[in-house]
Image (cartoon, grey):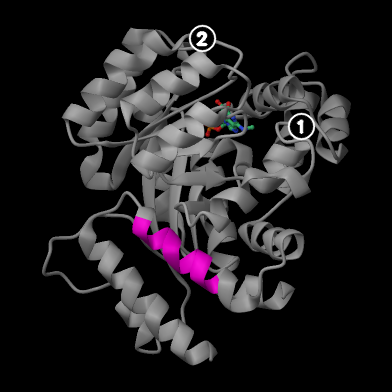
């Protein structure tokens, strides 16, 4: 099963760039920073957190602050983007929606725009695999069809989602949405709301999220990571294209979700390791899967949770008694919920069809 989950093509729709930084890179950058600026980072604390099996949400968000501290210039943003793409491609992810929060940091001359430019540089700089990130015109050659035709180089389609951090103001959230609109020709397809769920208020981000939707961007929301029934209801009332997590849902929320058929990005390891779900046998994956509700297995943060998309599939198979073909079907179904255009969707459908024939 492990080999099967590794070798089958996969679709990743919920991966945060900085949370997916390579562990070796994180340690290398932290060590270097520790040598030049002793106060900038607590290296031993970082090593300790990386090794921990279970992390409270507070510890997870502290970890993100530690990671953000090592991102001291644009070239590091470019490097980590490049490596994250390479890592997903080597795990046989054929379509990746990578999300990241555009960051302004005046002390290093970084604006939200220059941050996203550095991410795009990272996409361009991958050389070990072929990366498709520029949306094509309807009649252009299919990227993934080359793969069906026996091209042996690994290929990955990447689209970007810009995240609004819950610590941000309405103005900052709006700036991110405007940036996403400007960067559509570089494959930005949507907006995400994320960050510490204990922070901020839904009404702060609503104007920017509404604007994003009006302008044709897709929206996904971190929803129900903690118990907050009112916010969950407001988020579901907004009708986002997808939601992430859905851990603290009550009957009323499940009802709303079922009638709207909103796809759920499921991050098993993340939910278990942060205690958002007490144990895997009570994870809502089982309920949603049985109900045939649209769902997609995702990693969240491969570095922070020491996981990969193959591992998430293996975890689901082992925990819920699913077979190899169930896994491939789950992966294929994810294609229906991507934010990229129908051209990409059709190519991926064809690709999965040809792969499943070959795997028979
Ligand atoms: C909520 C999360 C998250 O944007 O700097 N992030 N937000 N819940 C989660 N699950 C535990 N995992 C990651 O990537 C890191 C940022 O993504 C959000 C947080 O805002 C975190 O700072 P970027 O690339």
Residue at point 37%, 53% (across, down): 337
Residue at point 48%, 44% (across, down): 264
Q: Which residues are magenta?
A: 328-336
Residue 116: where, in percent of width, then height? 38, 34
**Regarding mark 1 in the picture, which secondary structure is present there?**
loop
| The quarter of the displayed image where residue 144 is located | bottom left
Label 2 – label 1 distance at C-alpha: 21 Å
Identify whether 250 is placed above or below 199.
Answer: below
* Secondary structure, magenta segment, majority class: helix
- Asked if residue 16 shows in the view, the reply is yes
In the rendered image, which residue does mark 1 sit on? 275
Residue at point 28%, 14% (across, down): 207
Residue 333: where, in percent of width, then height? 43, 64
In the picture, the disc for residue 200 is 2
Residue 24: where, in percent of width, then height? 74, 47
Q: Is residue 251 left or right of residue 183?
A: right
- Indicate whether residue 335 is drawn in magenta: yes
Task: Indicate the quadrant of ligand 1 in the picture.
Answer: top right
- Asked if residue 21 shows in the view, the reply is no
């Amino acid at each position: 099963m492990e080999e099967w989950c590794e070798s089958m093509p996969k679709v990743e729709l919920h991966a945060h760039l900085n949370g997916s930084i390579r562990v070796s890179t994180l340690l290398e950058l932290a060590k270097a920073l520790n040598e030049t600026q002793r106060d900038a980072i607590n290296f031993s604390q970082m090593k300790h957190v990386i090794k921990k099996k279970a992390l409270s949400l507070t510890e997870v968000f502290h970890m993100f602050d530690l990671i953000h501290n090592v991102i001291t210039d644009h070239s590091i943003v470019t490097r980590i983007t490049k490596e994250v793409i390479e890592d997903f491609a080597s795990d046989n992810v054929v379509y990746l929606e990578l999300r990241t929060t555009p960051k302004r940091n005046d002390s290093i001359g970084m604006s939200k725009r220059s941050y996203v430019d550095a991410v795009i540089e990272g996409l361009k700089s991958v050389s070990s695999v072929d990366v498709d990130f520029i949306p094509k015109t309807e009649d252009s050659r299919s990227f993934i069809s080359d793969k069906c035709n026996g091209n042996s180089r690994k290929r990955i389609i990447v689209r970007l989602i810009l995240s609004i951090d819950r610590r941000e103001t309405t103005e900052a959230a709006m700036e991110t949405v405007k940036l996403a609109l400007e960067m559509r020709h570089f494959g930005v397809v949507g907006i995400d709301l994320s960050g510490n769920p204990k922070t901020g208020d839904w009404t702060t981000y609503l104007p920017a999220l509404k604007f994003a939707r009006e302008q044709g961007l897709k929206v996904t929301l971190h929803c129900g990571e903690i118990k907050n029934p009112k916010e969950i209801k407001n988020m579901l009332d907004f009708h986002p294209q997808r939601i992430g997590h859905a851990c603290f849902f009550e009957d009323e929320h499940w009802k709303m979700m079922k009638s709207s058929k909103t796809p759920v990005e499921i991050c098993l390891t993340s939910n278990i390791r942060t205690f958002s779900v007490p144990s895997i046998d009570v994870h809502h994956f089982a309920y949603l899967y049985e109900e045939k509700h649209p769902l997609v297995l995702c990693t969240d943060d491969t570095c922070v949770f020491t996981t990969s998309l193959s591992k998430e599939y293996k975890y689901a198979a082992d925990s819920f008694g699913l077979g190899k073909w169930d896994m491939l079907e789950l992966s294929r179904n994810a294609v229906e919920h991507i934010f990229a255009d129908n051209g990409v969707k059709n190519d991926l459908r064809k690709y999965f069809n040809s792969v499943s024939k070959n795997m028979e």
